[in-house]
């Protein structure tokens, strides 16, 4: 390879990396180019070279890919959120299927032949915009010293003002503008992450898509909110407003939410329904961001679990108990485990409000609760469902699952790389991959949910 930094190269984009960057191979040397799409012929400037690959900046699209479409948001290139907005939705789905497959092959060690047999086609979205029921919007100061709400420019902490993200409902804008005018009128200060001074850090907005209920929670670096009646005046005039609170986060950290929420107005939770079940959701609880696809995801998980009515199911990383309650309607008994105490509170409340009695919920880490219950109480499971965060399951959790030898494990994952890593361990311990399928919950982004069923080989 004899390229140098700043060289201009012309190339065809043949593939796309897991973060959505286009990959071209001029002279056989792989270059990653953000915003270049598979099928584009481009001109790019080399920005960084490593031994076996490099990075380049898109200078000009010479011949656009047949998959190129007009992006809906003018910030799509700057924003870190929508990496695939210029790619036709059908091709976004193809990208996600390839991503899952490649991870399962490269990291999981599964054969192409097996995946060809067991993987089912990805479940796409009917409307890949305005699907998010939750927004966590950072607040910052513009050059004139005014508070602005927006998003971080890709990979940085620089904020670009925009209250109109195309992934969320249009009403988010009205809510954010109300918060900003309250801040301006009452001289409420913006938090500055460099100095650790100032008050308002983020605004969390959640909407129950079925219930029409809205939740607003300001994340603040302090214990009280000045002139709160002014904020309430504006927010409570918005139709459907149900819960207004603030969350205290005084730490100098990238973690958005703090641990304590104080209610300012209305109820602690909002409600929403999926597939005939109703759920209470509090600010600190996890709740899937795309409720329409979530129903399809949960139905698939139930189908994979193949319940006949008498099984004992463990639902690890259960959040507010949504999957547990879906499963409980078709199982003997379901136990949920979740680390966030407020989510377990919500889960118990959700069992009550849906009159589901064959469930129990435990607070704690899956990798601690499961081994403890297994070693001390000898619990067993016919089916274990796991739905961990991106980092996947802890080794101790995987080991205990292998000790428990449930007939089936349904693994729901938002990161197919850690899924593949964990499946390698489980399939090395006597399980085989039986079914798998992507579900697109995050249109326009590179993220994709995957559900797989693995089964004990001797069953
Ligand atoms: N199954 C739920 C939640 C999935 S998100 C749903 O579909 O809504 C993952 C959940 O795992 C979050 O609620 C998070 O708080 C929780 N979590 C993260 N680490 C955990 C751990 N080590 N043990 C148990 N739960 C954990």
Image (cartoon, helix red, strand yellow):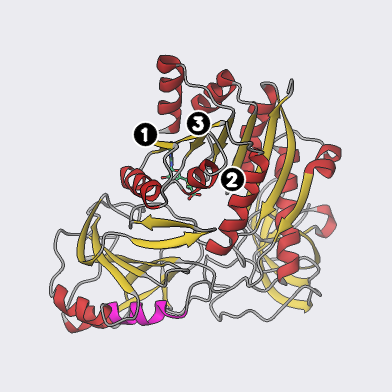
Residue 176 in the magenta stretch? The answer is: yes
Residue 413's label in the rendered image is 2
> Residue 291 location in percent, x, y?
53, 62
Q: Quadrant of the C terminus?
A: top right
> Residue 98 location in percent, x, y?
75, 52
Q: Is the residue under label 2 in contact with that under label 1 (CB below 8 Å)?
A: no
228 to 400, vertically: above or below: below
Alpha carbon distance from label 1 to label 2: 20 Å
Q: Nearer the viewer, residue 227 or 437?
A: 437
Disc on the earlier residue, 3 or 2: 3
Alpha carbon distance from label 3 to label 1: 13 Å
Provide the major secondary structure of the magenta segment: helix
Instruction: Report if the beta carbon of the residue with label 3 is closer than 8 angstroms to ligand 1.
Output: yes
> Residue 360 location in percent, x, y?
40, 35
Dividing the picture into quadrants, the one containing residue 88 is bottom right
Instruction: Report if the beta carbon of the residue with label 1 is closer than 8 angstroms to ligand 1.
Output: yes
Residue 364's label in the rendered image is 1
Disc on the earlier residue, 1 or 2: 1
Q: Nearer the viewer, residue 368 or 225?
A: 368
- Give the magenta-colored segment's residue range: 170-179
Q: Nearer the viewer, mark 3 or mark 2?
A: 2
Q: Secondary structure at mark 1?
A: loop
Q: Nearer the viewer, residue 186 or 80?
A: 186
Residue receiving disc 3: 394
Q: Residue at x 47, y 68 (%)?
A: 210
Q: Secondary structure at mark 3?
A: loop
Q: Is residue 318 left or right of residue 234?
A: right
Q: Is residue 228 left or right of residue 27?
A: left
């Amino acid at each position: 390879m004899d390229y140098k930094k700043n060289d201009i190269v012309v190339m065809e984009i043949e593939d796309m990396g897991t973060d959505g960057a286009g990959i071209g191979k001029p002279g056989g040397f792989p270059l990653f180019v953000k915003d270049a799409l598979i099928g584009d012929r481009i001109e790019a400037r080399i920005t960084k070279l490593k031994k076996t690959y490099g990075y380049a900046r898109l200078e000009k699209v010479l011949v656009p890919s047949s998959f190129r479409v007009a992006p809906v948001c003018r910030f799509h290139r700057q924003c870190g959120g929508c990496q695939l907005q210029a790619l036709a939705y059908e091709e976004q789905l193809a990208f996600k299927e390839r991503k899952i497959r490649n991870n399962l092959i490269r990291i999981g060690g599964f054969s192409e032949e097996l995946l060809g047999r067991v993987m089912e086609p990805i479940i796409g979205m009917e409307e890949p915009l305005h699907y998010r029921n939750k927004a966590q919007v950072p607040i910052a100061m513009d050059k004139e010293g005014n508070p602005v709400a927006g998003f971080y420019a890709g990979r940085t902490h620089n904020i670009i003002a925009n209250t109109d993200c195309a992934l969320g409902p249009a009403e988010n804008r009205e809510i954010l503008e109300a918060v900003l005018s309250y801040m301006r009128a009452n001289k409420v200060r913006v938090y500055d992450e460099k100095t650790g001074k100032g008050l308002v850090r983020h605004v969390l907005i959640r909407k129950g898509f079925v219930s029409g209920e809205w939740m607003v929670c300001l994340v603040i670096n302090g214990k009280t909110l000045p002139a709160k009646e002014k904020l309430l005046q504006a927010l409570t005039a918005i139709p459907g407003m149900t819960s207004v609170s603030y969350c205290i986060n005084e730490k100098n950290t990238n973690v958005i939410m703090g641990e304590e929420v104080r209610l300012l107005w209305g109820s602690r939770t909002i409600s929403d329904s999926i597939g005939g079940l109703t759920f209470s959701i509090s600010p600190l609880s996890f709740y899937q961001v795309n409720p329409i696809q979530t129903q399809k995801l949960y139905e698939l998980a139930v189908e994979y679990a193949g319940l006949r009515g008498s099984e004992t199911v463990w639902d690890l990383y259960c959040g507010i108990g949504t999957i547990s309650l879906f499963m409980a309607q078709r199982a003997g008994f379901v136990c949920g485990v979740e680390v966030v105490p407020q989510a377990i509170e919500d889960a118990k409340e959700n069992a009550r409000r849906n009159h589901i009695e064959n469930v129990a919920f435990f607070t704690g880490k899956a990798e601690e609760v499961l081994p403890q219950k297994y070693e001390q109480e000898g619990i067993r499971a016919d089916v274990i469902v796991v739905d961990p965060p991106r980092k996947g399951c802890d080794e101790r959790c995987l080991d205990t699952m292998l000790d428990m030898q449930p007939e089936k494990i349904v693994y729901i994952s938002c990161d197919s790389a850690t899924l593949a890593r964990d499946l390698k361990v489980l399939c090395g311990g006597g399980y085989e991959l039986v079914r798998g399928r992507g579900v697109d919950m995050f249109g326009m982004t590179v993220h994709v949910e995957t559900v797989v069923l693995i089964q004990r080989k001797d069953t």
